[in-house]
Structures are given as C-alpha cells and as structure tokens.
Image: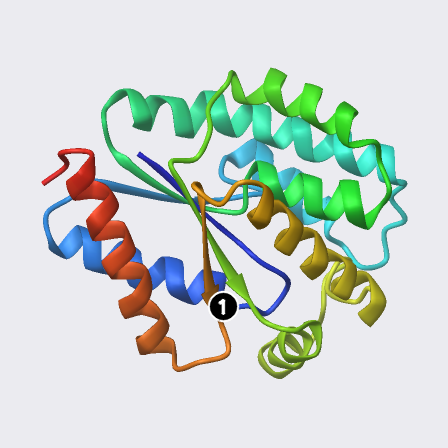
Amino acid sequence: MLITFEGIEGCGKSTQIELLYTYLTQKGRVVVKTREPGGTPFGEALRKVSLTKEMTVFPLAELLTFMAIRAQHVEEVIMPALEKRQIVLCDRFVDATYAYQGYGRGIDLGIIETLNRLVTKGIRPNLTILLDCTATVGLKRKSGHHRSLDRFEKEALSFHRKIRNAYTKLAKEDPERFFVVDANGDVEAIHRIIREKVDFLLNDHGIR
C-alpha cells in the first residue's frame, strides 16, 4: 500500500505524515516512512546539493536529478516494502514533478510522464493526500519554522501560487486517487480526517 502526501511548501505534510506513521505503527502495522527528493543515501546526498539556495539549477537538470533520485528510491525502498505488503508513507512522489517541474518550470508534461513511467516501473499511489492551503499561508509557516529557506522555498510568491493551482488541477483530473484536505485547520483535526480516510482504505483492501 503506497500512500503519498502532496502540497505546497508549508502545507503541513511532514507533521501529518509523522502523526499518521505513529497512529499506524501503534496499531501494529508495519510502516515505511520516506520522502522525495531523498529517501536513500544516494537520494539524500543529491537532495542536499539540489536544494541549496545558492545553487543555480536549470529546469531540465533539476528534472533529471529528481528522476535519478526517484529511480533509486523506487528500487531501494518503495518496491521492496510493497513486495513485503508493508504500508509506505511518502512525502512527495510523482505528482510533485508534474506540479513543480511541469507546471512550475514549464517542462513538457509528456516528457515528465515518460520519465515517471520509466523510473517508477508502473508503481502508482493507492492514495494521494493533498494538503491544501494558500501560498501566503504556506510560506508564512515556513518562514516561521525555518530561519534559512531552501532553493524552492525562496521562490517568488507567484511560483508557489502556480504550484498550488497545479495540484488543484491534478486532483480534479484524478479524483479517485486524490483526497484533498483543507490544511488551514487544527493539526489534530486534520489528522483525524486523514486517519479516517486511511482506515477506510486499509479495510477496503483487507488490511487489518
């Protein structure tokens, strides 16, 4: 079972993944918590370089770097966990590439689709939780929690608005997979909404 979390910077993904991970593990389920870019020693090394705010990275180079990270991530972490019938919680996955490098950077979506299909080996999330908030709210949260912003977080407000619009479009195009949650509310209230959705999904797949 692959459950991915998506959303703009500062939407609360990391917090909600942590809460869901704790909830599921306390119920005795085997859960793998991971992230993109990153997720493996190779991926984390490339993440550190590619997110450095002083780094100039052209869109195509950015795309190919993140695809390399995903290829390693799928082979080393995601596929082995799914083969063992474990639950994988992933902070960002394929949709982030469409949103950021596609709609954000302007790279052809067909190219992204082809590369995604190649590196994921056809793996698709069973559920994608989109935590939705305005770009203004997200960036305010980020600046409040982090003194130093990374290369994406320091992008102009217009860029982050473009990313939010992209996620909204992706969710409308695939409503059966996406579960959109208002990320402006109380952390625990959001967690309860997500928890109920995930419990229903697991029960529906016979996972007790």
Question: Residue 55: image x %, image y %?
Answer: 85, 51
In which image quadrant can residue 53 be found?
Answer: bottom right
- Give left or right: position of 94 versus 166: left
Q: Is residue 142 above or below residue 110?
A: below
Is residue 43 or residue 5 the one in the foreground? Answer: 5
Q: Is residue 34 left or right of residue 152?
A: left
Estimate the x, y position of residue 128 in percent, counting from the top left: 45, 46
Name the image quarter holding the C terminus.
top left
Q: Quadrant of the N terminus?
A: top left
Relative to 25, is 77 on the left or the right? right
Q: Which residue is mark 1?
A: 12
Residue at the image point whose x is 68% and y is 40% from the top:
97
Looking at the image, which is closer to me, 51 or 21? 21
- Residue 26 appearing in the image: yes
Q: Quadrant of residue 2?
A: top left
Camera-side residue of 124 and 204: 204
Residue at x 53%, y 40% (from the top left corner): 174
- Residue 111 at x, y = what percent? 78, 24
Residue depicted at x 48% and y 70%: 182
10 Å crowding of disc 1: few (<14), some (14-19), many (20+):
many
Q: Residue at x 77, y 32 (%)?
A: 109
Q: Is residue 37 visible?
A: no
119 sits to left or right of 57: left
Image vertical order of residue 139 relative to residue 167, above or below = below
Q: Amino acid at mark 1?
A: Gly
